[in-house]
Structure formats: structure tokens, C-alpha cells
Image (cartoon, rainbow, N blue to C red):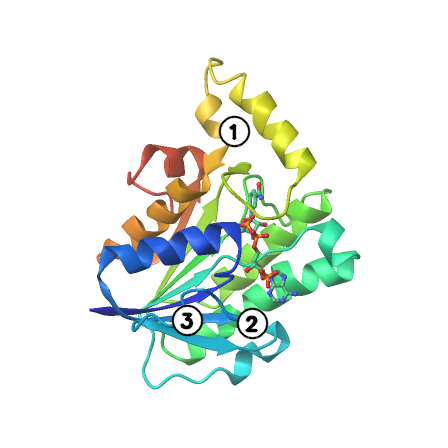
Amino acid sequence: MKTALVVGATGATGSALVNALISSDEYRAIHLLSRRTTHWRNRQEIREHILPLSRIGDLTMPYAIDEVYCCLGTTMKTAGSKAAFRAVDYGAVVALGQWAKANGAGQMHVISSKGANAGSRNFYLRTKGEMEQALSALDLPALYLYRPSLLSGERIDYRRKERMGEALMNGLTWLPGSDNWRPVPIDVLAQAMLQRARAHENKGRYRIESAQILRGLKRDSE
Ligand SMILES: NC(=O)c1ccc[n+]([C@@H]2O[C@H](COP(=O)([O-])OP(=O)(O)OC[C@H]3O[C@@H](n4cnc5c(N)ncnc54)[C@H](OP(=O)(O)O)[C@@H]3O)[C@@H](O)[C@H]2O)c1
């Protein structure tokens, strides 16, 4: 039986991931680090830690965590400024990586984005790319960077632009190579993370592109 820590469990992908972890019956403890409590709080395998992201470093565990999952992220609209966006999508994610390294976590799984690139002129893609670089430099035992296209699935907040993009992309799936950009269902992404966590022989750094997430467990690029 394994242990996991999920940061961002209250979000769309994080929720799907926690449900998948619970259903798998492979975890004796699933720790959730959030800024608010969740509906899973009374389950026997769930351990909630309510902390602001600025205090990730204060998190203490009675044992080394096998798998750390980062489903954190914000939008420019919610964050309100580039600095506030970067504090979450770069600052908090890298702080979690540093925590994972310092506390002996076996694996770290992080949702980045298709097109993430530290040299991009696009602020969102550049932030994600810089986050990937900073995590890679930590030399964690196993680092998985998931790079999905647009995410599709149920979410509480309605995001008009994302839904318009999803409708457009779904109408063009007949085009060759559409796996590279067509929307990724949130449940499929959660299962892709779980599948790779089970592949214990995987040590090192893996980038899992959108098409690979959609195709299931295939050879990942390092
Ligand atoms: N949406 C897309 O189409 C898309 C495409 C490619 C990649 N991605 C990336 O995929 C990841 C997951 O996306 P998602 O759509 O599943 O995310 P989401 O539903 O927006 O959830 C984000 C999570 O991060 C937490 N969070 C955000 N700001 C926080 C803050 N200041 N303090 C504490 N917690 C904070 C949220 O907590 P609360 O519930 O408390 O707010 C929530 O748990 C993100 O990194 C995103 O950039 C998304």
C-alpha cells in the first residue's frame, strides 16, 4: 500500500485524480494540501492539511511520501496579475518540488501544458516552461511532466474561452495529427498519472505530451 500527496485536489483535475486514487485501493494514505476542506475529509485514507501555498515548506509528514501530485494552477483572470499568476504556476509548484526533494518523495507528477517553453513569448507558456526547468534542476528520483492540450470535463467555474476552444477542436478531430491538440478529458489525464505512478521501473524525467496522454501508457520521452 502506497502513500500520496495531492496539491490542487479541489480543482477539476485534482478532484478526478483523488477519486481515481481512492478507487484504486492501492493507497493507505492520501494526503491533500489545500486552502479549504473537501468532501473526502471523513474517508479513512484521507488526511487533509489546510495551509496557504506560501507555507508549503511547513508541511510535515510522519513518513516519506511515495507519490506527490501537483494539479495546481490558476488563470490570469482569477489571479489578477502576472505576478500573482506566476506565484501559483511557478512559485508554488517549484516550492512543492523542493519539499518533495527535501522530504524524500519517490515520484513527483506535475501538470504543465502543451507548448510549455521557457523561451516562449507567451507569458503562460513561458511560466510553465520555466517551472519545468526549475523542477528538472532539482534532480528528483522520478519526475513526470504532463503537457495536455485544452482540458475537457466538468468544472464548477464556467470558462467561456476554454469551452469555445473545445468545441472548435472537437469539430476538427478528422484532421491528421489531431491527437496532438484535441482536448484531453480530465479523467483520462488522471488515469494517465496513475498509470505512470504504477510503472515503478521508471526513474528519471519524463515529458508526457498530449497525444501520449490520450493514447494511454506508451513509451514516454525523457
Ligand atoms: N484548463 C485547461 O484547459 C488546461 C490546459 C493545459 C494545462 N492546464 C493546467 O492543468 C493544471 C490543472 O488545471 P485544472 O483546470 O484542473 O485546474 P483548476 O480546476 O483551476 O484547479 C486549480 C487548483 O489549484 C488551486 N489553487 C489555485 N490558486 C491557488 C491559490 N492561490 N492558493 C491555493 N490553491 C490554489 C485551486 O484551489 P481552490 O479550489 O481553493 O481555488 C485548485 O485546487 C493547471 O496547472 C493548468 O494550468 C490546464
Residue 41's disc number: 3
Position of residue 154 relative to residue 84, above or below, is above
The image quadrant of residue 192 is: top left
Task: From the top left corner, tell me how far across and down residue 11 is, in percent.
Answer: 53, 55
The image quadrant of residue 186 is: top left
Position of residue 94 relative to residue 73, above or below, is below
Q: Mark 1 points at which residue?
A: 181
Q: Is label 2 in contact with label 1 (beta carbons under 8 Å)?
A: no
Q: Name the residue under label 2.
A: 95
Q: Disc 1 marks which amino acid? A: Trp
The image quadrant of residue 105 is: bottom left
- Give the secondary structure at mark 2: helix
Task: From the top left corner, tell me how far across and down residue 150 is, in percent.
Answer: 55, 36
Task: From the top left corner, tell me how far across and down residue 177 is, in percent.
Answer: 46, 20
Within-10-Å neighbours for mark 2: few <14, some 14–19, many 20+: some
- At a point 34% along the width and 58% down the height, the residue shown is 204
Residue 202 shows in the view: no
Considering every residue shown, the one lying at the far right of the view is 81
Task: From the top left corner, tell me how far across and down residue 62 is, in percent.
Answer: 34, 86
Q: The N terminus appears in which quarter of the rendering?
A: bottom left
* Mark found first going from the N terminus, 3 or 2: 3
- At a point 51% along the width and 42% down the height, the residue shown is 154
Q: Distance between the residues labelled 3 and 2?
A: 25 Å
Q: Disc 2 marks which amino acid? A: Ala
Observer-nearest of 58 and 33: 33
Position of residue 136 relative to residue 34, above or below, is above
Q: How far apart are marks 3 and 1 (CA)?
A: 36 Å
Q: Disc 3 marks which amino acid? A: Arg
